[in-house]
Image (cartoon, rainbow, N blue to C red):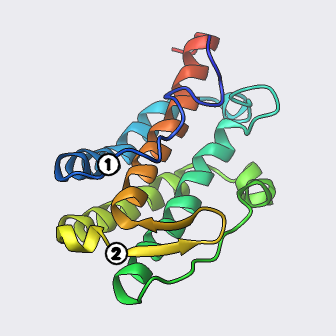
Amino acid sequence: MGDLRYPVGAWDRTTEATAAKRREWIQQLADAPRQLRTAVEGLSEHQLDTPYRPEGWTVRQVVHHLPDSHLNAYVRFRLALTEAEPTIKPYDERLWAELDDARSAPVDPSLALLTALHQRWVLLLESLSAADFGRKLHHPEIGMITLGSYLGSYAWHGRHHIAHITSLRERMKWD
């Protein structure tokens, strides 16, 4: 069954953000909203409230987490493109996932938000030069990171959480 926390493996921070990799990652971001919608399609309220692993978030929390996280990333990209090596503000994703809207709200607003956000984010990403992807931001918990590497981490992040849902569906035999 493998490690349920990392169904697509852990993010490898050493992956080089080549032009080919950046194109692949941008496509993965473009595809993520549709893949997430497909992953939760037809699930009942009970299924949405099922944790994807013991002591893990529910499917509903995972769905709400993706636009929360990716909205923060989008803003951080814009800051790094308009400021010199900005220090970004981290947030406690575990506490955000425990807020009432993340624990109980319908998933449709978050699916719509992720779709709109990724449309806009992909437009921005496709307009960037290689030099732009070399711009840096300072993450207090990680250190300096280039936008190219940051892009890769969020392409992985979407695949990672969508796989939490699809692997749960497979294990539970939810057709």
Relative image position of residue 105 (x, y in whole percent): 69, 53
Q: Is residue 116 above or below residue 84?
A: above
The number of numbered discs placed on residues in the rendered structure image is: 2
Residue at 42%, 33% (x, y): give it: 38
Closer-to-camera residue (133/166): 133
Which residue is tagged 1? 16
Q: Provide the secondary structure element on which disc 2 rests.
A: loop
Mark nearer the N terminus (1 vs 2): 1
Residue type at numbered disc 1 = Glu
Relative image position of residue 64 (x, y in whole percent): 61, 52
Residue at 22%, 51% (x, y): give it: 18
Q: Provide the secondary structure element on which disc 1 rests.
A: loop
Number of residues whose C-alpha sits closer than 10 Å to that of mark 2, classed few (under 14), some (14–19) or many (20 or more): some
Number of residues whose C-alpha sits closer than 10 Å to that of mark 1, classed few (under 14), some (14–19) or many (20 or more): few
Closer-to-camera residue (79/163): 79
Relative image position of residue 128 (x, y in whole percent): 20, 71
* Quadrant of residue 58 within the rendered picture: top right
Q: Is residue 89 visible from the viewing direction of this image?
A: yes
Label 1, label 2: how far apart the Cα atoms are: 14 Å
Q: Is residue 128 visible from the viewing direction of this image?
A: no
Which residue is tagged 2? 135
Residue at 45%, 82% (x, y): give it: 85
Side of 175 relative to 155 (left or right) = right
